[in-house]
């Protein structure tokens, strides 16, 4: 299809979609309205479950199955990336070119690594109380490790990052979520039922299974992001195809 | 039993997690055994659930109070469970097929392939069982993500990565459109469950006296877009031949066997549960939309299928054609149409997976899936040839295959349907039989590349890497056994007498808009007594025989000819360009087309 | 709407808007400068919003930006280093922006909050912001 | 009057999204995408969704740009090599 | 005003689609897909907004406070994760495309036609 024809098809499609969507918008309840039946029910249920952060309650209690699916999407895409970015038979691993990083930057990187990591852990741990949770904190924690690459150098990152361990933790985090859900079944209730004691409202141990599921997600996300970035880094810095002339020779 | 429903989805997830966690240290046979066990356990659970009365499972014990819930529900109705069971069985077959013969896994990840297959299974089972719109979106994405990774699995070659990319773009775009639609529905109804949303739409229609306004239609169109992308209906179908042509053979068996059908299932499920009531989309609009797209897909798929020389691509286009027929069956919106389509899907899954299995054997023996290159090379493997030809006849609708029975049930619904079904079955079956005759009998002339008649672009299937690492000398026993068992399954669908009755009852429950909501929200399952049902009739069997005979005739006529090209079809072939931009443009144009059809 | 929110609004329109303009045109260096400036301003915006809505817990977002914002900018300087060049236009603005902006936001907020854990958190964010701003503006200047 | 803030951020998000689409060079697009992520985080906070804002910040500020730029670098390596 | 957020969500969706369809670089197209997805966050959160309400987080607010809809926030959160993972996976495919085809311009990719 030529570019011109594609543009015509696209224009027709975009126009029709825009018309359809705009017509639908005129029928929507106005922005900022006060009618949110599901939301109101969810808030009541979350308070009854003594979880201060209602969003975490929805994610890890009321609609915990969605989060299981979401973690599986993350898990699957990491596994998929590992498979897609594997080193193939016609490629070799070369030592990455050393990069000279100024001392001030190195100091900043080394200093900020523990600080960022702590902030990440804080965000995970307070997931059921204040904004944050396993996913947000997990990504922050994983980013902290990569300060070693962006502010120090790649070998420093590789020393601090036993990849096998992170792959293990990735699987273990997913398995932990699945098994915590099964605890509900074993206790005689439904899958993913919140069967633990609910604790005191607005404390770290409140919410029953919510903090545990949150922690499982935190472990999985941290390790998943580390594994994901490890494969992108390896492709960009280490893996090289055999040169064309070598292959033909 | 209801409480255990989630395990059908969760057991494969746990299997995959264990395979990845143990990744480096688990030897390959152990990994494969664990995967097989997890898949089989899930299949067993689904089968046991099928024998019990239908049940629903509220996750987290957040059951409804006064018809409202804050949780997610899994619905174990017969059709959804049946699809989950079919998926799981096919996954077991695929794991057996790829046992020990599939190409070397990535270093240190012996369990990567089986783990991905298990995740795929979990995604499809979750999608089949969920009774919640957003949860369905999550599982749709899970299916998608695993699908892209599996399609691009053979990264050493050029075409798989391109096919996977195209698949990824079009499918994700469809998913996001659906999410917009779900957002619109949520704004209107304040609900996410299918039963709750449907009921809320009906109530608001009852209160205001108007149903099916622009918002509801837009939500319907946007959600339908994602499902039609999955179902590969024209003009959303472009990704399918590209992805199927390049994916590893075991993956093709799953993609064509069940994943594409999930799209049709989703369309039917969402329509009947959410939009079929007085507050939804008028039945005429929904019927027109599905019918037009179904018929066009069936015809275009058959036309494209006939002209392929790349055998996997040929089978892929036959999937487009047959999915078009499924959509046509669903479009009737009658219990009989759905029952027939369900039987047809069961038979098709067995036949199509068997055909891919045989093609995989050819690929592993000869390093090619090109009809011309393979000419006569299959003469020494009569067994594989017989299976391949039987698969072609099953596609063509030869009684007593399940495909034929399903088609017959659908055809009875309207006088013009037999013509469409016979034509499409004959052409797709004929194309497969033509390949069988050339490859396994050496009929016709050995084609050489340049002169094989092609007007317009085409994809050849030569110079492919066998998936077994190196070429195998004889067809591996597990591969042939799997293909034979799959065909036996397709045969059983048409010959086991009780099945049709059970499916008809299930279809009646499936099409019952109010009954579904009552069963899910009020705990009052509607009673659908097993009544009279149609089985084989003389007309149905006769039409099946006719289309099979036509397929054989077409194959016989064409086998000696040099050209497969159909005059005048070059512009259509040129549209299949493998270009992401083209396909995305067609997808939005499709949204426009569907909204026109739904509104008219 | 109170004064804190009004200040946040002014920062969004008068600060983030021009940053977007700067990030969308010009040389690669100028774009990275704009990105860096945007993360600095964003941190301040989050602090103002937390105060304006009376929700101290929103300050967690500022805390995260204070560490991840510089990390993001360093990603760009590290991987686009050969394109940005030394001393891209606009660099001069970075150091004064952070040295004036951070105290100008944090100090009034500390006064409003009074002594306590919230103030310690605010000062911590301010320190992180200044340290991050100093390092990134230096890294951007080097190119 | 709260509306003014919402409208300002919404317009900023729309502008950032449009600019991200119109940047044809992937490395430069990554910069605009990172700004889009920041703008979305502000929008989410203004819409009283700090949880989502935090997630968007975590993903959009460093991880996504890093992945995009590493991809760009890998692709350029291939192009820079003589055939 | 009462429709603006919804319309902007639609605008972002269409702009992203336009970008993918006209892209000459697959990395750029992946970026545009991310833009397309951000429309869904905007729509979901706009739908759940309530004027004058605060975040549904009660660690530093009284439990009697009026709050916005927490459900859409949970959905948007899931959506953000899904978006990031899809981006990663597609970028991995782009890396391999560059290796095996020597180009990432969709106009130059051939091999799957007809």
Image (cartoon, rainbow, N blue to C red):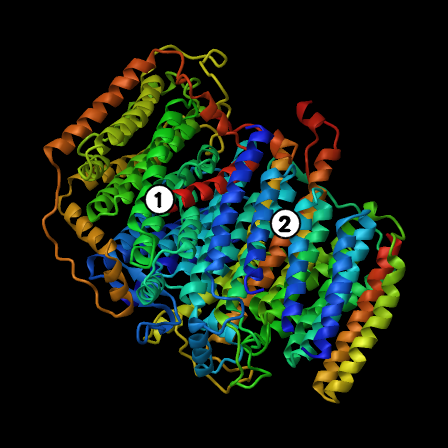
Please say whether residue B54 is visible from this viewpoint: yes
In the picture, the quarter occupied by the N terminus of chain A is top right
The residue nearer to you, when weighing C66 against B445, is C66
Question: Which labelled disc corresponds to residue B363?
Answer: none
Q: Hey, which residue is sitting farthest bottom in the picture?
A: C115
Q: Which residue is mark 2?
A: A231
In the shown orientation, is residue A104 left or right of residue D48?
A: right
In the shown orientation, is residue B326 left or right of residue B414?
A: right
Q: Chain of mark 1?
A: B
Q: Residues within 10 Å of mark 2 (few under 14, many from 20)?
A: many
**Residue B417 coordinates in the image, percent (x, y):** 23, 34
- In the rendered structure, are the residues bearing label 1 and label 2 in contact, judged by CB atoms less than 8 Å apart? no
In the picture, the quarter occupied by the C terminus of chain A is top right
**Residue B404 coordinates in the image, percent (x, y):** 21, 34
Q: Which residue is mark 1?
A: B258
Q: Residue placed at 43% from the left, 47% from the top? A: B225
Please tell me how many numbered marks the rendered image carries.
2
Determine the CA span between mark 1 and mark 2.
Answer: 32 Å
**Residue B245 coordinates in the image, percent (x, y):** 45, 32
Q: Residue placed at 9% from the left, 49% from the top? A: B532
Please say whether residue B110 is visible from this viewpoint: no
Above or below — where is B338 with respect to D15? above
Does dot 1 land on a helix, a strand or a loop?
A: helix
């Amino acid at each position: 299809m030529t570019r011109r024809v594609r543009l015509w098809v696209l224009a027709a499609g975009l126009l029709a979609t825009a018309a359809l969507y705009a017509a639908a918008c005129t029928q929507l309840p106005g922005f900022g309205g006060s009618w949110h039946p599901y939301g109101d029910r969810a808030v009541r249920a979350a308070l009854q479950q003594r979880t201060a952060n209602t969003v975490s309650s929805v994610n890890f209690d009321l609609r915990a199955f969605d989060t299981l699916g979401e973690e599986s999407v993350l898990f699957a895409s990491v596994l998929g990336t590992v498979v897609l970015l594997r080193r193939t038979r016609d490629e070799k691993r070369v030592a990455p070119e050393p990069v000279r990083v100024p001392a001030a930057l190195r100091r900043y990187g080394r200093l900020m690594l523990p600080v960022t990591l702590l902030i990440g852990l804080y965000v995970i741990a307070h997931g059921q109380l204040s904004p944050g949770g396993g996913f947000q904190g997990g990504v922050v924690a994983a980013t902290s490790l990569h300060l070693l690459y962006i502010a120090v150098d790649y070998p420093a990152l590789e020393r601090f990052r036993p990849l096998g361990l992170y792959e293990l933790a990735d699987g273990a985090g997913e398995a932990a979520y699945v098994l915590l859900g099964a605890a509900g079944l074993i206790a005689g209730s439904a899958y993913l039922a919140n069967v633990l004691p609910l604790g005191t409202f607005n404390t770290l141990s409140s919410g029953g299974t919510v903090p545990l599921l949150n922690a499982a997600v935190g472990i999985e996300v941290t390790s998943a992001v580390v594994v994901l970035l490890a494969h992108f880094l390896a492709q960009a810095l280490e893996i090289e195809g055999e040169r064309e002339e070598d292959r033909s020779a | 039993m209801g409480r255990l429903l989630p395990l059908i989805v969760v057991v494969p997830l746990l299997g995959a997690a264990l395979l990845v966690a143990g990744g480096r240290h688990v030897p390959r046979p152990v990994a494969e055994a664990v995967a097989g066990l997890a898949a089989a356990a899930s299949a067993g659970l689904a089968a046991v659930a099928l024998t019990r009365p239908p049940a629903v499972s509220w996750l987290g014990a957040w059951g409804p109070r006064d018809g409202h819930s804050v949780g997610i529900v899994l619905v174990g109705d017969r059709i959804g469970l049946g699809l989950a069971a079919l998926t799981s069985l096919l996954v077991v077959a695929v794991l057996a097929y790829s046992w020990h013969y599939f190409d070397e896994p990535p270093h240190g990840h012996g369990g990567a392939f089986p783990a991905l297959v298990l995740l795929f299974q979990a995604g499809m089972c979750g999608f089949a069982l969920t009774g919640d719109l957003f949860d369905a979106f999550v599982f749709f994405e899970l299916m998608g993500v695993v699908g892209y990774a599996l399609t691009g699995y053979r990264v050493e070659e050029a075409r798989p990565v391109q096919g996977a990319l195209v698949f990824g773009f079009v499918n994700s775009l469809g998913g996001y459109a659906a999410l917009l639609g779900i957002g619109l529905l949520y704004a209107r109804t304040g609900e996410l469950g299918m039963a709750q949303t449907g009921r809320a739409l009906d109530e608001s229609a009852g209160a205001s006296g108007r149903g099916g306004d622009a918002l509801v239609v837009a939500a319907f169109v946007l959600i339908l877009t994602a499902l039609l992308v999955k179902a590969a209906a024209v003009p959303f179908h472009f990704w399918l031949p590209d992805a199927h042509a390049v994916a590893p053979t075991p993956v093709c068996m799953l993609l064509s066997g069940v994943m594409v059908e999930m799209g049709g299932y989703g369309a039917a499920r969402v329509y009947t549960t959410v939009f079929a009531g007085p507050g939804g989309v008028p039945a005429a609009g929904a019927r027109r939309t599905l019918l037009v797209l179904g018929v066009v897909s069936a015809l275009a798929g058959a036309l494209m299928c006939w002209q392929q020389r790349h055998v996997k691509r040929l089978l892929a286009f036959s999937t487009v054609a047959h999915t078009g027929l499924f959509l046509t069956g669903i479009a009737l919106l009658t219990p009989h149409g759905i029952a027939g389509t369900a039987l047809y899907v069961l038979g098709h899954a067995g036949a199509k997976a068997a055909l891919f299995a045989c093609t995989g054997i050819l690929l592993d023996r000869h390093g090619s899936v090109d009809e011309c290159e393979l000419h006569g090379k299959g003469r020494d493997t009569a067994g594989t040839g017989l299976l391949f030809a039987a698969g072609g006849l099953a596609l063509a609708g030869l009684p007593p295959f399940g495909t034929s029975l399903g088609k017959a049930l659908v055809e009875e619904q309207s006088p013009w349907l037999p013509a469409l079904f016979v034509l499409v079955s004959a052409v797709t079956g004929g194309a497969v039989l033509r390949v069988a005759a050339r490859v396994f009998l050496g009929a016709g002339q050995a084609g050489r590349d340049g002169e094989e008649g092609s007007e317009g672009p085409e994809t050849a299937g030569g110079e492919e890497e066998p998936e077994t690492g190196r070429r195998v000398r004889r067809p591996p026993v597990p591969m042939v056994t799997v293909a034979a068992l799959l065909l036996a399954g397709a045969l059983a669908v048409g010959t086991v007498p009780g099945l049709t009755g059970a499916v008809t009852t299930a279809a009646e429950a499936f099409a019952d808009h109010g009954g579904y909501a009552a069963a899910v929200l009020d705990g009052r399952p509607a009673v659908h007594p097993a009544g009279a049902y149609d089985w084989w009739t003389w007309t149905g069997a006769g039409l099946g025989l006719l289309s099979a005979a036509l397929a054989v005739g077409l194959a016989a006529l064409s086998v000696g000819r040099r050209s497969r090209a159909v005059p005048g079809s070059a512009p259509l072939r040129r549209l299949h360009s493998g270009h992401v931009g083209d396909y995305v443009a067609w997808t939005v144009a499709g949204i426009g087309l569907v909204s026109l059809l739904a509104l008219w | 709407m109170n004064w804190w929110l009004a200040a946040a609004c002014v920062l969004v329109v008068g600060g983030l808007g021009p940053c977007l303009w700067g990030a969308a045109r010009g040389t690669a260096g100028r774009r990275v400068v704009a990105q860096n400036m945007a993360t600095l301003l964003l941190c301040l915006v989050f602090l103002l919003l937390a105060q304006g809505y009376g929700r101290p817990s929103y300050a967690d977002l500022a805390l995260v930006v204070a560490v991840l914002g510089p990390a993001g900018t360093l990603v760009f300087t590290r991987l686009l280093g050969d394109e940005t060049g030394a001393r891209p236009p606009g660099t001069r603005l970075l150091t004064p922006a952070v040295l004036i902006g951070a105290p100008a936001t944090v100090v009034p907020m500390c006064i409003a909050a009074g002594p306590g854990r919230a103030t310690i958190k605010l000062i911590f964010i301010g320190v992180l912001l200044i340290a991050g701003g100093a390092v990134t503006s230096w890294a951007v200047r080097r190119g | 009057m709260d509306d003014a803030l919402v409208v300002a951020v919404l317009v900023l998000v729309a502008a950032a999204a449009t600019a991200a689409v119109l940047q044809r060079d992937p490395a430069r697009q990554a910069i605009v995408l990172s700004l889009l992520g920041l703008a979305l985080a502000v929008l989410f906070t203004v819409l009283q969704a700090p949880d989502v804002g935090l997630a968007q910040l975590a993903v959009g500020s460093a991880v996504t740009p890093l992945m995009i730029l590493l991809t760009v670098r890998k692709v350029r390596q291939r192009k820079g090599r003589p055939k | 005003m009462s429709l603006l957020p919804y319309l902007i969500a639609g605008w972002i969706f269409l702009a992203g689609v336009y970008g993918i369809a006209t892209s000459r670089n697959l990395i750029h197209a992946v970026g545009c897909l991310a833009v397309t997805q951000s429309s869904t966050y905007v729509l979901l959160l706009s739908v759940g907004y309530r004027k004058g309400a605060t975040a549904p987080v009660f660690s530093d607010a009284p439990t009697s406070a009026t709050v916005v809809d927490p459900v859409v926030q949970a959905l948007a959160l899931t959506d953000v994760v899904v978006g990031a993972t899809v981006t990663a996976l597609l970028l991995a495919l782009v890396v391999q495309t560059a290796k095996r085809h020597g180009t990432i311009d969709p106009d130059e990719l051939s091999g799957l036609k007809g």
